[in-house]
Image (cartoon, helix red, strand yellow):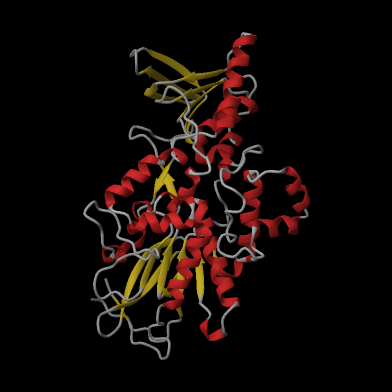
Amino acid sequence: MSVAREPEVPVYDLVGIGFGPSNLALAVAVQEHNDGVPAGEALRAVFLERQSAFGWHRGMLFEDATMQVSFLKDLVTLRNPASDFSFVSYLHQRGRLADFVNHKTLFPLRVEFHDYLSWAAERMSHLVAYDAEVTDVLPVHDEAGEVVCFDVVARDGVRRARNVVIALGLELSLPPEAVLSARVWHNLDLLSRLAELPAAEPRRFVVVGAGQSAAEVVGHLHERYPSAEVCSVFYRYGYSPADDSSFANRIFDPEAVDLYYRAPADVKRMLFDYHRNTNYSVVDIDLIDDLYRRVYREKVLGRERLRMLNASRVADVVPREDGVTVTVESMPTGERQTLDADVLIYATGYRPVDAVKLLGTAGPLARRTGEGLIQVDRDYRVVTEGGVRAGIYLQGGTEHAHGITATLLSNVAVRSGEIVRAVAATPRIGAAKPLALVRGA
């Protein structure tokens, strides 16, 4: 074990890694906790974000796209309805509260909700460091050999933490054979990549995927480029509608997390499979109907620009300097057609980031299940090996333990409150006097 004694290093109660909506909600929960307790009980926290500014799915901020969750599932309302960090408070501050009420909707524009998140992030700027990509998390031992802190190593320096909260969101999910390039994209960067296209009007786009993002990309391209053909390629026979009915939506309630967490493994799998159609590879019915109207209208008019290549797959991709040649195979018949396109866009979703990879040196401290999944307590604290008193918490990547809401906005407010309560209830190791700490692998 390498020794580096640093007895006077300042220690944070909480260091958050990542500053998307989940850790933004956590920052607000920390702030509101601190506002309600004596100064000596306030939590010292900082959040590290690799981006240079706050941003959330910027590449999909279409002007007419709406949220799929109610505005009441914002950063705070389900935890603290009186909070002035609510979406309603944001609307009031922006001078649009009455206008929004008259709009008679629960689902704001996505660009508006992004502005709300940015508004909250700006108010939390004193708790976040941008351009601070984390490269490692090092265990810090006391003289008895127990892990009592972590050194979070970032590009801009090191922070010592009694607790680390990881909220890295999702990473791109692509078919194994997909290779991104100048003309082969993932929809995550769509708007910025479209801005880089040559001035000449595109002739054809190919979009792969059957979920909400794919359908939105298809609709956006079809409207934005009135001379271009847009080909939607997906395995299914047709887009499947999302189940957003009232009873099914209860799977996103905070109470459902308790029920799911306590359920046997086979029941968890059953519930997850039953309710996949609330979120995974499904499309809002209004968007499905809109796309169908466009297809039918074009058939009537005799100029079909919007093509649904259903029950099909991409069999081959050959990049060119000015585009890409895509071979699409009909799975029922085996017939193939070749499409010369300006751009191929994979709108194939995302998958959770493996938090253990980011933990780096501290990664082996996390216990895993027999299926290789991270063991997590009900309060989102990672179950660790013996001799670890410092805490690791996850926001995201715990669907196997907490259910569908683990990666969604629906429960960020309540989850953040639970994590803050757990951290605040943990004794502050070494708070009364400096510890002789030892950093080691």
* Left or right: 417, with 260 as reference point: right
Name, please, the residue furthest toward the left. 370
For the question of whether residue 20 can be seen, the reply is no
Residue 352 x %, y %:
39, 49
Residue 120 x %, y %:
63, 61
For the question of whether residue 261 can be seen, the reply is yes
Res 293 → quadrant: top right
Please report the residue visible at 36 percent of the width from the left and 59 percent of the height from the top.
358
**Front one among 211 and 140:** 211
Name, please, the residue furthest toward the top. 302
Please report the residue visible at 59 percent of the width from the left and 72 percent of the height from the top.
32
Q: Quadrant of the C terminus?
A: bottom left
Q: Is 127 drawn above or below residue 144 in the view shown?
A: above
Q: How many marks?
A: 0
**Front one among 406 and 431:** 406
Res 313 → quadrant: top left
**Front one among 40 and 243:** 243
Q: Is 233 drawn above or below residue 360 in the view shown?
A: above
Name, please, the residue furthest toward the front. 247
Q: Quadrant of the N terminus?
A: bottom left
Q: Is 251 drawn above or below residue 296 in the view shown?
A: below
Res 364 → quadrant: bottom left
Residue 85 x %, y %:
64, 63
Residue 321 x %, y %:
48, 26
Q: Is 16 drawn above or below residue 202 in the view shown?
A: below
